[in-house]
Structures are given as structure tokens and as C-alpha cells.
Amino acid sequence: MDNRKLITIAIDGFSSSGKSTMAKKLAKNIGYAYIDTGAMYRAVTLFSLRNGFFHGNNLDIESLEEALAGINISFAVNCEGRTETMLNGENVEKEIRGMDVSSKVSIVAAVGTVRKALVAQQQAMGKEKGIVMDGRDIGTVVFPDAEMKVYVDASPETRAQRRYDELRAKGDNVTYEEVLANVTERDRIDTTRKESPLRKADDAVVLDNSNMTIEEQDKWLLDLYNKISSQE
Ligand code: DC
């Protein structure tokens, strides 16, 4: 790392827009910490499923709220340098990425008390700056004063194809149609919910990566960081 002033980097966007991959890579390149806030909402969803708070798509919000103080989410770095999500000390990285959690997480993420608790944790994690955080409300709610804000966009079909390839590679037996339906439904819930809906912060820079390679988007992001951090 050089002696440039540490900044806060907020990366928001739709599910499966590729934002986590690029955020993670940028953090590694510039020696910053990386936080995947979607993983935190996913961990709370897994906890809710395991504890029987879901009845179909109905969430028993009261029981979840009572349990909230006992849900501890942290991140650990494995021997390959990858960050893994821990729920009350258990590594749940694999489980939170499956379709069971994916199909319920938007319901949990729409609960105001859950958001309040997780936003407070995220703000504490980023208070020293030098952090790349990705999610839906990072540039608007968690760090409205972030020096660098990116809003990542891509068509639902592009995102569904990426997610489908990812799940199939992991051995998940899903169809493209199921994944597209899940992506579209999550978009709908994430953008129309009452609590902190996904929206572009006024001062965010938009990146539509539908037709970009991973290398192109990584370079785009690093160039933007170099430009902004040299002005700070
Ligand atoms: O980025 P992801 O697909 O892992 O996010 C999972 C869900 O969590 C998604 O439905 C949106 C929600 N989320 C949110 O509401 N706010 C965040 N900061 C991050 C994720």
C-alpha cells in the first residue's frame, strides 16, 4: 500500500451483477478490507430457516427480532486467502449461497429492525476507512459520505446466466428459468421495499458491465480508485 489517504469505497447494485467479484479483487489489489454485506443478510436468513421462523414465505418477524441479539456474524479468511462468512462461530459460506437461502433472503432484508442492526455493524466495521463494502444501500445509507461510490448494473438475463453458471459449477441442480425467476423477483423486492430500497446514490458512478470482461471491469474500477484517491 502507498501513503495515499484511506478512503471508503461503496459498491452497490443488483444481485449477481458481479459486484462482489470486482469489489473483492479491488480490495486485494489496494490492500483494503472487504465486506460483503449481502452475506450478512444471507446469514440472518439461514438462521431464520434453521430456527423455523419461516412458514412458506411467511416470516415470523417477532421471533426473529427476539433472536437478533444472539446472531453473531463475522468473517474469517481461509488458508487460500478467501473470506468466509461465520454465523455464531460456524462457517456457513457454502450454505448461504444455495437456493434455499437465496429464495428467502429478500424477505429478511426487508425487515427494518434487521437492517438497523446490520447497518450499525457495517458502520462499525468501516469506521477506520480503508474498506471496500458491497451491497444495496452502502452509498445511500451505510456510508453516504463515502469518497468513492459505484452503482453496478447489468441486464437480468446476463445476471441470471452468471448465477446459473456459478450454481451449476457448484453442482446445484437448478434450471436457468428458476434462476432468472429468482433474480427478477429479488430485483422487484429489493427496489420496491419500504426500508432502504436499492437505488443509485446521486453521486455514484454507474458501471454497466453487461458487455464487459472481468479484466475490463477490474481495470475500470482500479482506474476510478486511482483517480479519486489521488484527489483526496
Ligand atoms: O448481494 P446478495 O445477492 O448476496 O444479497 C442478498 C440479499 O440481501 C439481496 O436480496 C439484497 C439484500 N441486501 C440488502 O438488502 N442490503 C445490502 N446491503 C446487501 C444485501
Image: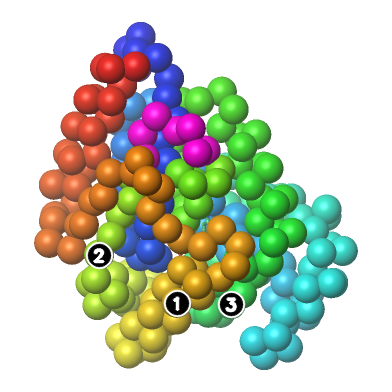
Count of picture labels: 3
| C-alpha distance separating marks 1 and 3 | 13 Å
Residue 24, quarter of the rendered image: top left
From the top left corner, tell me how far across and down residue 148 is, in percent.
Answer: 36, 34
Question: Mark 2: which secondary structure?
Answer: loop
What type of secondary structure mainly makes up the magenta span? loop
Position of residue 150 measured from the top left corner of the image (x, y, whole percent): 33, 45
> Is disc 1 placed on a helix, strand or loop?
helix
In the displayed structure, does residue 187 sit left or right of residue 55?
left
Please provide the residue range marked out in magenta.
143-149
Q: Can residue 161 be seen in this view?
A: no
Residue on which disc 2 sits: 154
Callout 3, which amino acid? Answer: Lys
Nearer to us: label 1 or label 3: 1
Q: Name the residue under label 1.
A: 188
Which of the labelled discs sits on residue 104, or is there none? 3
Q: Does the CB distance between marks 2 and 3 fall below 8 Å?
A: no
74 and 195: which is toward the camera: 195
Residue at 40%, 14% (x, y): give it: 5
162 relative position to 59: left or right: left
